[in-house]
Image: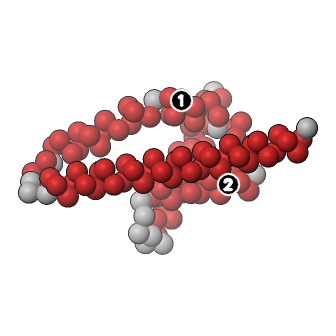
Amino acid sequence: MKVFKQLLILLGINFMGELLSHYLRLPIPGSITGMILLLVLLFAGVIKERQIAETADFFMKNMGFFFIPAGVGVMVSYQSLEGRYVQTIVTILASTLIVMACASLVTQFLIKRRKNHDEISD
């Protein structure tokens, strides 16, 4: 029952993100709006990490599974990529490098922050 409640919380926030994007005509997908909303709710303390931890861990451990529909979508509509192979490959490589750089910078920041916090605590 606990996991079901956590799933309802996450799906409810995702649904609210979809509604916000639709009715406010935001230029970003509702799923992204939902993730931003979840982040805001977590920082504000409205939702505690322990309230969604098990379900979030499950999703993180099985993240690769959720990319299958996108991969199948690309395989089905490969005709739309015809003649744009170089642009597609450059875009994929550039976006991958940007994500890797951002992730490494955030990780370094968090490691330094934790180290400083541990030094202050001691």
**Left or right: 4, with 88 as reference point:** right
Q: In the rendering, at what x and y percent does residue 1 appear?
A: 63, 27
Q: Which mark is residue 41?
A: 2
In the foreground, 1 or 60: 60
CA–CA distance between discs 2 and 1? 20 Å
Q: In the rendering, at what x and y percent does residue 73 appear?
A: 23, 44
Using the rendered view, name the quadrant where residue 74 is placed. Answer: top left
Contact between marks 2 and 1 (CB within 8 A): the answer is: no
Residue at the (59%, 50%) spot, across then down: 106
Q: In the rendering, at what x and y percent does residue 11 appear?
A: 53, 45
Can the viewer see residue 71? yes
Label 2 neighbour load within 10 Å: few <14, some 14-19, many 20+: some
Give, as a three-letter code, the residue at label 2: Leu
**Left or right: 107, with 30 as reference point:** right
Give, as a three-letter code, the residue at label 1: Phe
Can the viewer see residue 81? no
**Left or right: 94, with 7 as reference point:** left
Residue at the (43%, 72%) spot, across then down: 25
In the foreground, 108 or 10: 108
Name the residue tied to disc 1: 58
Q: In the rendering, at what x and y percent does residue 16 appear?
A: 54, 57
Secondary structure at numbered mark 2: helix
Residue at the (52%, 47%) spot, across then down: 103
